[in-house]
Image: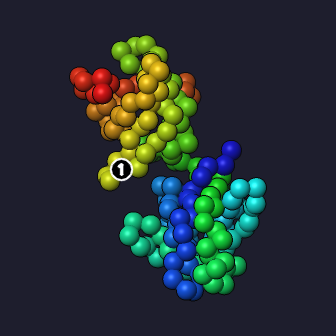
Amino acid sequence: MEVQVGRVIKSHGIRGEAVVESTTDVPEVRFAVGATLAGTQAAKEQTLTVETVRPHKGRLLIKFREIPDRTAAESLRGMKFFASPLEREEDSEDYYDHELIGLKVIHEGAQVGQVTGVMDAPNRKILEIDYEGREVLVPFVMDFVPDIDLEEGTLTITPPEGLLDV
């Protein structure tokens, strides 16, 4: 299974840089100079090599070796990059988004839904949960998500009163 690690938003400047929104926890690994990225855009697949990378307004400006100018960079608009998931250390308390999506949600001992997505917010992640047929957002913090069992495929939530009523 491959996971999305980023997508091209638009071109930047005249030298062929692309504005890339990172959707990975480890952009310094995925978008390191010399890294090759598998990109998909509509039905087209392309492999690109990172030549330079620098932060810019919360995103990355990346120059790809195969992209010589602004016109070529503009043709990448909407391209999504995919990669194999990185292995997590066994005793790590961190989770990759793809590990959380699809987990059954347990609340007060009963299954009440499923994690359908993970949003990145400043300083934390927010879980998108299909809770009894409607979408609710739960901050991914220990107080609200005290237990995750990847082997069982479950995630237990203990939200404060009113959070699930929104």
Work out whether residue 81 or residue 165 is closer to the camera in this orientation and state it. 165
Q: Residue at point 55% right, 31% down?
A: 102
Q: Residue at point 50% right, 62% down?
A: 21
What amino acid type is highlighted by mark number 1?
A: Ala
Locate residue 88, reporting x and y percent. 54, 47
Res 14 → quadrant: bottom right
Q: Residues within 10 Å of mark 1 (few under 14, many from 20)?
A: few
Q: Which residue is mark 1?
A: 121
Q: Dividing the image into 4 quarters, which one contains the C terminus?
A: top left
Picture layout, residue 140 above or below residue 85: above
Locate residue 120, reporting x and y percent. 41, 49
- Whether residue 72 is visible to the viewer of this picture, yes or no, is yes
Picture layout, residue 139 above or below residue 20: above
Q: Residue at point 66% right, 71% down?
A: 75
Locate residue 119, reporting x and y percent. 43, 45
- Whether residue 150 is visible to the viewer of this picture, yes or no, is no
Q: Dividing the image into 4 quarters, which one contains the N terminus?
A: top right
Work out whether residue 11 or residue 142 is closer to the camera in this orientation and state it. 11
Res 18 → quadrant: bottom right
Residue closest to the far left: 161
Locate residue 72, reporting x and y percent. 66, 78
Q: Is residue 44 left or right of residue 103?
A: right
